[in-house]
Image: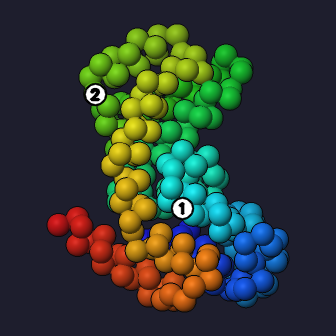
Amino acid sequence: MYLVLELLVARLAARGADGGPGKKPREPGPHEPLLLDGDAPPTLEEIQSWGQSFDRLMRSAAGRKVFRDFLRGEYSEENIMFWLACEELKREVDPDAVEEKARFIYEDYISILSPKEVSLDSRVRETVNRNMVEPTPHTFDEAQLQIYTLMHRDSYPRFVNSPLYKALARMSAGSPSAPPAQSAQSTQSASVGDAK
């Protein structure tokens, strides 16, 4: 269920003592799982910062990938996907591409017909509908802020307290912990128990 996080824990475990704080991580061997599209695993300091600040988690590419994997397990992945789509839209400068991307975002995440619809209050939804008359890179700013706040207040505390994140922090610090597969099983059990 938490594939990216499991791979990260496995990679950090395989890295061992030679990748401690302040040291450059070694290149992965052929037997090690690839992670984050070939990116080096995050440093201990970066992983620890994810537990201290939601803003730091969201500024980190690795952190966003791990958090997205966590949200997928909570059946709320659409929140971070919407947030990421809005970030991409803000970087777009071509007016035709802005309009096309805005329509895709609307259809994928705002439309009540979408299976990936994000939860927005009526005021923000009305603002988005007005903005869609002439889309700009900032059409979804209010909606994006509302979803960011929702993730910060709702999902982030569960992420930081999840057994898998705690195992990741322990593994990156070099302290002993359960193997990744065992950690994943206990996390999945805890997730199922939390859903009841």
Q: Determine the CA span between mark 1 and mark 2.
A: 27 Å
Residue, x 23% and y 72% (percent of image)? 193
Q: Quadrant of residue 118?
A: top left
Q: Nearer the viewer, residue 48 or 112?
A: 48
Q: Could you tell me which quadrant the C terminus lies in? A: bottom left
- Tell me the amino acid under the disc marked 2: Asp
* Residue 86 in the figure: left or right of residue 161: right
Q: Could you tell me which quadrant the N terminus lies in? A: bottom left
Q: Nearer the viewer, residue 12 or 99?
A: 12
Local packing at callout 1 (Cα closer than 10 Å; few below 14, some 14-19, many 20+) is many
The correct choice, above or below, for 94 with respect to 83 in the image is above
The correct choice, above or below, for 58 with respect to 34 in the image is above
The correct choice, above or below, for 26 with respect to 56 in the image is below
- Per the image, label 2 sits on a secondary structure element best described as loop
Residue 171: where, in percent of width, then height?
A: 58, 80
Of pointers 1 and 2, the one earlier in the residue sequence: 1
Residue, x 41% and y 45% (percent of image)? 152
Residue denoted by label 1 = 66
- Tell me the amino acid under the disc marked 1: Val
Residue 17: where, in percent of width, then height?
A: 72, 85
Q: Nearer the viewer, residue 35 or 94?
A: 35
Residue, x 64% and y 60% (percent of image)? 46
Q: Is residue 10 visible?
A: no
Q: Name the residue furthest left.
A: 196
- Per the image, label 1 sits on a secondary structure element best described as helix
* Residue 90 in the figure: left or right of residue 81: right
Q: Is residue 157 visible?
A: yes
Residue 38: where, in percent of width, then height?
A: 75, 66
Label annotation for residue 2: none
Residue 7: where, in percent of width, then height?
A: 59, 75
Label annotation for residue 121: 2
